């Protein structure tokens, strides 16, 4: 990709993708184009530094010159970190998004990458960060470098047609949470707000359709765009939904999108006094008959139920785990852009309500 020789790209993907019927076709077409690809698919839904390190070794072993990121957030985030580390020193956590750690990497030594998303949620294909699980403390850590953003994105909705309804729902709610938290983040950023609003409109108009009929290519197309829009918008910031879902996923393995869907209404209620004035415009974009905070909240609850997503953390989290989650959420970078400050007591209260299904103020 960057040399004068035809060196093989490393295709970073996951086991689900390699079993799909179109996967051999893509590999054959690359091979026909005189690109003898190597495949690295040993990736968990919550990838760790070990998955990255093994991928780096595969990249070097095959003398690859770039990465093709084919899959959802796990494959894309792992592949972005492989590209970061193939020619830069240290481990992936040396580049955690704190201070200016990213300056430790030489941008010229980050391998080029092409992202081909197969889900419509993470939006990692347009993002400058990756989320990697640290097994030492079970925390999901955000790895950042401006040049982690893939060089090229091929957004083909036909590749998301086979996504099962449950994953369509969860990833779609992740994209919605990206847009919603970006829209409510306190910074002045009207461009991000506009992108977030349109992203939420596309999700409102298309998520149920794609959930009901995975072959609905129009719906799949709009959701793929909404996912990229969410990740574009959240350069403005995320919030408490993600500050809670990151540690929940790290400790319990709960799917990131499912966790966001559960937390969404409880976080809305916590933030109500500072986001309420933003709801009329959102309600208009969603096409709701009313414009109050309650109208948007009820729409979220109805959508979540329609998609058969859980209302509570029951079966996912024990009450005894809440103190640990509180301390981890307090350290999550997403919390700093929540529109309302959160004390440890606030975090404990929101988690307890999500565990019990308590929608009271
Ligand atoms: Fe997310």
Image (spheres, rainbow, N blue to C red):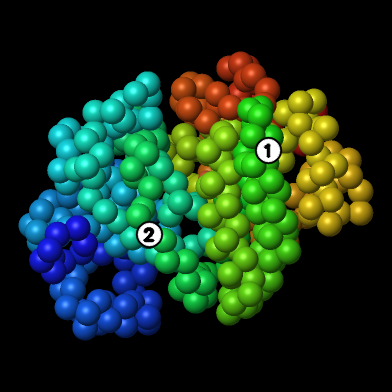
Residue furthest front in the image: 4
Q: Which is nearer the eye, 245 or 158?
A: 158
Residue closest to the eye, 2 or 177: 2
Q: Residue at x 17, y 33 (%)?
A: 90
Query: Residue 7: percent from the left, percent from the top?
Result: 13, 65
Find numbered disc 1 in the image and state the secondary structure of the residue it sits on: helix
Residue drawn at 20 percent across, 53 percent down: 55
Quadrant of image for the C terminus: top right
Relative placement, left or right, of 54 versus 129 is left
In the image, which disc is placed on residue 92? none
Residue appearing at x 22%, y 79% in the figure:
33
Task: Tell me which residue sits at (59%, 70%) in the image.
Answer: 220
Element assignment for label 2: strand
Q: Which residue position holds label 2?
A: 152
Q: Position of residue 236 (x, y in %)?
A: 57, 35
User: Is 53 in front, or is 349?
Assistant: 53
* Position of residue 279 in the picture relative to residue 215 (left or right): right
Residue 54 in the image: state x and y as whole percent. Answer: 17, 50
Q: Nearer the viewer, residue 235 or 279?
A: 235
Q: Are marks 1 and 2 in contact (CB under 8 Å)?
A: no
Q: Quadrant of residue 252?
A: top left
Q: Residues within 10 Å of mark 2 (few under 14, many from 20)?
A: some
Left or right of residue 286: residue 200: left
* Dot 1 beta carbon under 8 Å from ligand 1: no
């Amino acid at each position: 990709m960057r040399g004068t020789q035809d060196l093989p790209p490393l295709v970073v993907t996951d086991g689900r993708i390699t079993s799909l019927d179109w996967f051999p076709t893509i590999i054959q077409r690359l091979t026909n184009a005189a690109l003898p690809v190597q495949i690295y698919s040993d990736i968990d839904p919550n990838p760790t530094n070990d998955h990255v390190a093994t991928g780096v070794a595969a990249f070097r072993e095959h003398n690859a010159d770039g990465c093709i990121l084919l899959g959802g957030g796990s494959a894309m985030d792992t592949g972005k970190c492989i590209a970061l580390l193939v020619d830069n020193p240290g481990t992936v956590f040396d580049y955690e998004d704190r201070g200016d750690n990213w300056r430790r990497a030489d941008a010229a030594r980050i391998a080029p990458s092409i992202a081909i998303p197969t889900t419509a949620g993470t939006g990692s294909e347009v993002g400058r960060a990756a989320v990697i699980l640290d097994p030492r403390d079970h925390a999901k850590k955000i790895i950042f470098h401006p040049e982690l953003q893939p060089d090229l994105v091929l957004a083909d909705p036909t590749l998301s047609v086979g996504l099962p309804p449950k994953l369509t729902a969860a990833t779609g709610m992740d994209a919605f949470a990206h847009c919603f938290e970006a829209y409510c983040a306190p910074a002045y950023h009207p461009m991000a707000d506009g992108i977030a609003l349109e992203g939420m409109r596309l999700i409102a108009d298309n998520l149920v359709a794609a959930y009901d009929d995975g072959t609905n290519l129009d719906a799949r197309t709009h959701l793929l765009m909404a996912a990229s829009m969410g990740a574009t918008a959240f350069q403005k910031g995320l919030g408490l939904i993600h500050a809670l879902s990151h540690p929940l996923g790290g400790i319990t393995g709960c799917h990131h999108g499912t966790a966001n869907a559960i937390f969404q209404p409880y976080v809305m209620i916590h933030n109500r006094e500072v986001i309420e004035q933003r709801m009329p415009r959102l309600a208009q974009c969603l096409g709701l008959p009313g414009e109050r905070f309650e109208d948007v909240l009820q729409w979220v609850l109805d959508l979540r139920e329609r998609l058969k997503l859980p209302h509570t953390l029951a079966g996912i989290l024990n009450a005894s785990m809440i103190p640990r989650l509180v301390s981890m959420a307090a350290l999550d970078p997403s919390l700093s852009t929540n529109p309302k400050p959160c004390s440890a007591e606030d975090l404990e209260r929101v988690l307890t309500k999500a565990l019990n299904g308590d929608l009271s103020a």
